[in-house]
Image (tube, rainbow, N blue to C red):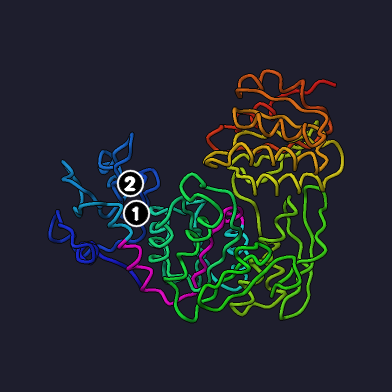
Amino acid sequence: MIFLTVQSIADILGGVFVGEESSRFLKVKGAVRDNRDVRPGNLFVCIRGERVDGHDFAGSAFQAGAVCCLAERAIPDATGPYIIVDSTLEAIKILGAYYRSLFDIPVVGITGSVGKTTAKEMVAAVLGEKFHVLKTPENLNNELGVPLTLLSLDEQHEAAVIEMGISDFGEMSRLAEMVRPDIFIITKIGYSHLKELGDLFGVLRAKTEAFSYMKPDGTALLNGDDDLLRDFDPGLKKITYGVNSINDFRVENVRAFGTDAVKCDIESPAGRFMITIPAFGSHLAMAALSAAAAGSLLGMTNEEITRGVLAYSPVGARANVRKKEDITIIDDCYNANPNSVEAALQSLSALDGNRIAILGDMLNLGAQSDLLHSEVGEYAAQCGIEKLICCGNHAKFIFDGFLKAGGKSARHFHSNAELIELLPELIEKRSTVLIKASNSMKFDEIVLKLDESRLAD
């Protein structure tokens, strides 16, 4: 059985143990940063945030069953042991990397400018047909979430699927040094975090830092339809997937069955087979293809892969479909960049009936922001979207691009409140409505209003 003790954690981190001598050898299982998530046996990591200091919740964590706390200062009236380090964030990364090294199991790392959470869920669903899989919960893919996920590994796990998200240079190196993936998937080099990364070549450079931390027998699993990834040499075995015939794994004959499912054919070195994805979005075919390729690399049969794809389900506000009496709502407002918005519009355009898109600002696009917003509007018109509703200062350029490209029906609002006030009048019955924007735009307010609204005839 693999576990750490309070003393071993102090030794690994070079931290100062504080507590009763008898507590040095208590077993620690898993780590959390939120006292509300504590389960008996956990290590509670006290993180100093801009608004909240985790040290203030150490007492609650002990009450909930935490075995030990990781802290940067003394904890008054502590009812359990704690370890003092200079930086709890740096310490948890060291601990996560050490703990991952204790497991000899296949680890799949996933990144990309768009679709990495969907790919993570799809890969985990597929591998789950053969292995007991640990996956990143929700989208805890940063320098704190990744080590906390790794510390959730236990002896029952036979594989791990770890999502790795970055916004600047150097972050992927720090994540990959912890994860040490055996297979590393890149879904897309796209327009995200351009304020920090500059351009697509900067995004490529930042994402591909991971290859320096892989074993020589590791595999780069790359979207071969992406020009930059197709031409990139990772310095180790490279497998490509996509629509183009040059790819090692290919997807063909993608067809949507309303908002209920997508079917497609996969051509792989192990033969051709059909899969059914039980969710909305033609773009899901690429996520399923990456999962099929990962499963095949780990020895899974086509039948196992097919069953695994059927077990997939979307998470959170990612193309979450709700069918109401009057309309169908596609809640995709978790986040947005030009690539993900265009993929959502493409999937919307494949549906029958009246199609409406409510789009908002896409943030962190740097100097190209106005142009990229305008191009999204043009793409919406090219997709044949019947009505476009835009909200936000940057979204004005989506609105302008839509009209420039021949879109007929469009409205622009400066604020959510302004839009929400008129929402019931803007949406026709028997329509399918896509709602998408960057998370900070709080478009969940619009989804809630639409859910509650009675539409005019």
Report how far apart the C-alphas of labels 2 and 1 lie in the structure: 7 Å
Quadrant for the N terminus in the image: bottom left
| Looking at the image, residue 369 lies above or below residue 227 | above
Q: Which quadrant holds the C terminus?
A: top right
Q: Circle 2 is placed at which residue position?
A: 64
Instruction: State the residue in front, 391 or 334.
Output: 391
Residue 104 pos. (x, y %): 43, 77
Front residue (pair 355, 259): 355
> On the image, which quarter does residue 414 sit in?
top right
For the record, the magenta segment spans 94-118
Q: Residues within 10 Å of mark 2 (few under 14, many from 20)?
A: some
Q: Amino acid at mark 1?
A: Pro
x and y percent of residue 383 in the render? 80, 44
Give left or right: position of 21 versus 178. Answer: left
Mark 1 nearby-residue class (10 Å; few <14, some 14–19, many ≥20): some
User: Disc 1 designates what residue?
Assistant: 40
What residue is shown at x 83% (from left), y 40% (from top)? 384
Residue contact at pointers 2 and 1, CB within 8 angstroms: yes
> Left or right of 258: which side holds 146?
left
Viewed as shown, does residue 415 lie left or right of 251?
left
Identified at 76% across, 62% down, the residue is 276
Q: Secondary structure at mark 2?
A: loop
In this orientation, which residue lies closer to the viewer: 294 or 34?
Answer: 294
Reply above or below: 292 against 447.
Answer: below
Residue 84: % across, % down = 18, 53
